[in-house]
Amino acid sequence: MTEPHDAPMAPSPGSDTVRTIDLGDGIGPTLPHASELWSQPFDAWTHADAAVNPLRSSQLDHAVQPAAMVIFGVSGDLTSRKLMPALFDLAVGQPLPEGFSVVGVSHRDWSDDEFRAKMREAVTAGSRTPVTEETWQGFAKGLSYVQGDFGDPLTYSRLSERLRAIDTERGTKGNRIFYLATSPNFFLPIIHGLETASVSERQANYLEPSEGWQRIVVEKPFGHDLESARQLIQEMADAFSERQIYRIDHYLGKETVQNILAFRFANIIFEPIWNRNYVDNVQITAAESIGVEGRAGYYDSAGALRDMVQSHLLQLLTVVAMEPPARYSGNAVRDEKVKVLRSVVPPLGEQEVRRWVVPGQYGPGFVGGTAVPGYRDEASVAPDSKTETYVALRLKVENWRWNGVPFFLRTGKRLPRRVTEVAITLKRVPHLIFGGAELEPSPDVISMRIQPDEGIAIRFNAKVPGAGTLIRPVRMEFSYGSAFGEAGPDAYERLLLDVIRGDPTLFTRRDEVEAEWSIVQPILDVFAAPDAPGPFAYPAGSWGPEEANAMIALTDRTWRRP
Ligand code: BG6
């Protein structure tokens, strides 16, 4: 059966329900009526009536079934810094079912015990939960290791044997998650290795797998440009159906990014002003104080545009700009995000890119009072590298809601401090009643702080106490930490749990990835030209090159100091 990625299969004539199981969207309490199913562009068909759905309880069971997670590239940084600590925290917090197992795969010559010892170090350094002998032993029972090269067929036969043994010993029943935590050049060799050795299986989007479900998780970068992303999408689609693929953008796992949706769609007060009638401009900033931190091998061929804008910043833009989805479920949310991305008008043609996109590169300077080298002096960076470590750009979202509102995005390494925020600046009041132009109040600003000091602040004007009518801006703040009293889980904890539960809402769908690259590609083309602009120099520890200030000044606006 060909899978209707773009044109859904019709239910049989006369039937008003579709008897298929949705492995992701069906988790939520509200399932769509069959009449709605016709309009679902992807794989969101679910049984129409949850109350009479005989499969409903098995859908919920799906949420917590034991499974084996195979991590390729388990000796790498991502596994020790993020994945293992998150899995341990999940296991101790007990949303993970008994029997959940992890198989590490890498070229290192480790025994199972050596592997466990390494992972214990990683978990001790990175988990939220303190590691005790008892909690560690409980977790370590499920860890094992398979040594091998990713291009060697024997690696996959060993893996297959191990997985079968785990099925018998730990009751994982063929449920598998393959996690590609490797450099992207290994993605396809691993996928082909799994396929050829029949370790993995392409499972139809709509059918309950007869013997265990299989999912694959792919880290960014998903492709190097539009063409390679399309090719990767296609090659992966031959081995796994879209329903099985979880493309990670860890920004979507951040509590505060999800909170933007709650802020917008769980309150009535903001949505009426969330449009071109009230919003003057939107600024999305992801500033980092760190440099390339030993990742120059990857970063020098990526740059800030690919590394941050193509994924994280565009995802932030989608959650700020999207229309309300009908429900909080995988495809309803992602359909709206895709619509926003497709409405983004990239700088059209070369001249607009030159005008509205500013690449920068840090030189030597001081961050937090410490002298740091310039980018070109970092280890493994070519002395004449033109890679941008900073980029600022203006995008427009050309739709009914946002027509005429500029979206300014910027990100950079070696900026004064680490801060990620979205700021919505509102228009000025239409008429001043408080005196002359010198008393003109500042515009109101809603700022959503993604990290650190997670929270939301509203800046508005108030009267200064005393005689007269002096007006001054004041801030009203909501702080995540003090309102809820505890730190939220790490983004990876949330995302790994969603993969295990089979909920794709916070993962990037293939049409989303493609739309993101379509926005970025014309800019990459100009950056690759022999007479490409910049990168413009900025001293480490500053807020970026002067040219970025000049760009936003073209619109009579300035960058916020977050
Ligand atoms: C990664 C980028 O995806 O995100 C890094 O590759 C960047 O270069 C990191 O430092 C930022 O993530 P966070 O969660 O620290 O904001």
Image: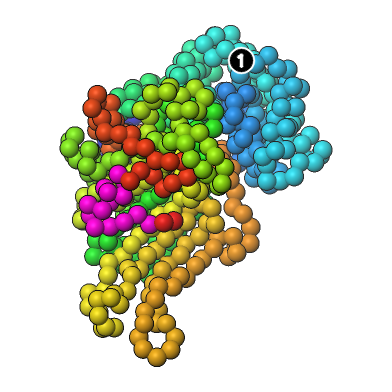
Q: Which residues are magenta?
A: 547-560
The reply, left or right, for residue 181 in relation to residue 547 is right
Amino acid at pointer 1: His
Q: Position of residue 121 (x, y in %)?
A: 72, 32
Q: Name the element at disc 1.
A: loop
The front one of 515 and 558 is 558
Q: Position of residue 445 (x, y in %)?
A: 37, 65
Q: How many marks can you see?
A: 1
Residue that sits furthest to the bottom in the current view: 467
In this rendering, is residue 167 above or below 156? below
The reply, left or right, for residue 275 in relation to residue 463 is left
Q: Is residue 382 magenta?
A: no
Q: Position of residue 108 (x, y in %)?
A: 65, 16
Q: Crowdedness of circle 1 by 10 Å Cα count: few (<14), some, many (20+)?
A: some
Residue wearing tag 1 = 107
- The image quadrant where one finds the N terminus is top left
Q: Is residue 557 magenta?
A: yes
The front one of 163 and 206 is 163
The front one of 52 and 24 is 24
Colour treatment of the image: rainbow
